[in-house]
Image (spheres, rainbow, N blue to C red):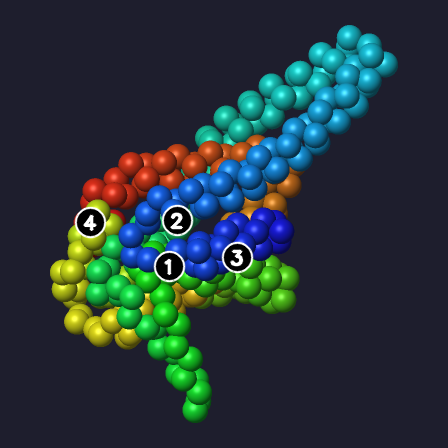
């Protein structure tokens, strides 16, 4: 998971930030992006295919040594895992957990896709410099709207949030877990409010120069946007780590089925959110 977070959130977004140097994505920009990501994807597929091929060879050797009864047992285990998942759907605890499962799907689609699109569609960002002032030092980053999308992805600190709420704090009691969930809820509420006041309503669908709820300057608006990028990653990590803790503790003997239901519901919610992400106004999505 740490390697996935570093490569997915930092590597890819950092490359996008460094490569996109104009407001319009032209052919000269599109081809290198397509080539780099295609090569990386192909390398990943080859490595994954080698792992699967080795597993299939080992599995075939085990089948040759095993008798038909053991092979039937393996198939029955898969069927039994599916039946356990169906039984879990009938329990009160799992039915209640379906709500936060779905919320994580909608939330991830919003801050990974809709929020980044709003940044890229806000015309006033343009090619103006993004100013960051720390004590007596003034750092200036010249960033176009499209490059800012990559900067948003870099600042979404799931890696830091996962380490903070999963390894450093290590909540053990139910009250400590509730406190972490409350912190995550508070951080994400701030993020949603900042998105509402910072971006025009039609930003998810079109490039816009319309006014937002509060008329911030370009630099102030960018500061608010990137602070939101940072805190939403922390909030999402807080909620997800506690969901994993609940699943591992409440469903010790059926954890595989419980996590499968979590991924299923989260994926369905993400797919639903993607279906209206580019057409619904920002306030309705929030």
| Disc 2 from disc 1: Cα separation | 9 Å
Residue at image point 36% right, 70% down:
142
Label located before the other in sequence (3 or 1):
3
| Residue farthest to the right, as pictured | 65
- Mark identifier at residue 29: 2
Question: According to the image, label 1 marks what residue?
Answer: 21
Residue 232 at x, y percent in the picture: 41, 61
Marks 3 and 1: which is nearer the front?
Answer: 1
Residue at image point 85% right, 14% down:
65
Secondary-structure class at tag 2? helix
Label located before the other in sequence (1 or 4):
1
Question: According to the image, label 4 marks what residue?
Answer: 206
Q: Is residue 203 visible?
A: yes
Q: Residues within 10 Å of mark 4 (few under 14, many from 20)?
A: some
Contact check, label 1 and label 4, Cβ < 8 Å: no
| Disc 4 from disc 3: Cα separation | 27 Å
Contact check, label 2 and label 3, Cβ < 8 Å: no
Image height of 282 relative to 72, above or below: below
Marks 1 and 4: which is nearer the front?
Answer: 1
């Amino acid at each position: 998971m740490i390697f996935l977070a570093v490569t997915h959130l930092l590597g890819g977004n950092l490359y996008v930030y460094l490569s996109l140097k104009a407001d319009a994505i032209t052919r000269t920009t599109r081809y290198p992006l397509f080539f780099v990501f295609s090569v990386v994807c192909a390398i990943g597929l080859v490595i994954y295919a080698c792992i699967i091929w080795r597993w299939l060879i080992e599995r075939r050797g085990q089948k040759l040594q095993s008798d038909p009864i053991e092979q039937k047992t393996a198939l029955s285990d898969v069927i039994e895992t599916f039946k356990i998942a169906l039984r879990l759907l009938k329990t009160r605890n799992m039915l209640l957990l379906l709500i936060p499962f779905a919320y994580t799907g909608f939330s991830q689609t919003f801050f990974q896709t809709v929020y980044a699109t709003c940044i890229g569609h806000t015309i006033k960002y343009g090619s103006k410099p993004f100013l960051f002032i720390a004590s007596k030092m003034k750092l200036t980053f010249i960033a176009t709207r499209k490059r800012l999308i990559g900067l948003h992805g870099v600042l979404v600190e799931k890696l830091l949030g996962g380490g903070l709420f999963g390894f450093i704090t290590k909540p053990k009691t139910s009250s400590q877990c509730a406190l972490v969930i409350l912190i995550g809820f508070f951080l994400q509420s701030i993020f949603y409010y900042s998105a509402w006041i910072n971006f025009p309503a039609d930003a998810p669908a079109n490039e816009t120069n319309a006014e937002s709820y509060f008329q911030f300057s370009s630099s102030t608006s960018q500061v608010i946007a990137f602070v939101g990028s940072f805190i939403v990653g922390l909030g999402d990590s807080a909620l997800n780590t506690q969901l994993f803790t609940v699943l591992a503790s409440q469903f010790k003997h059926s954890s595989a089925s419980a996590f499968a239901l979590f991924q299923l519901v989260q994926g369905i919610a993400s797919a639903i959110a993607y279906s209206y992400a580019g057409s619904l106004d920002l306030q309705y999505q929030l």
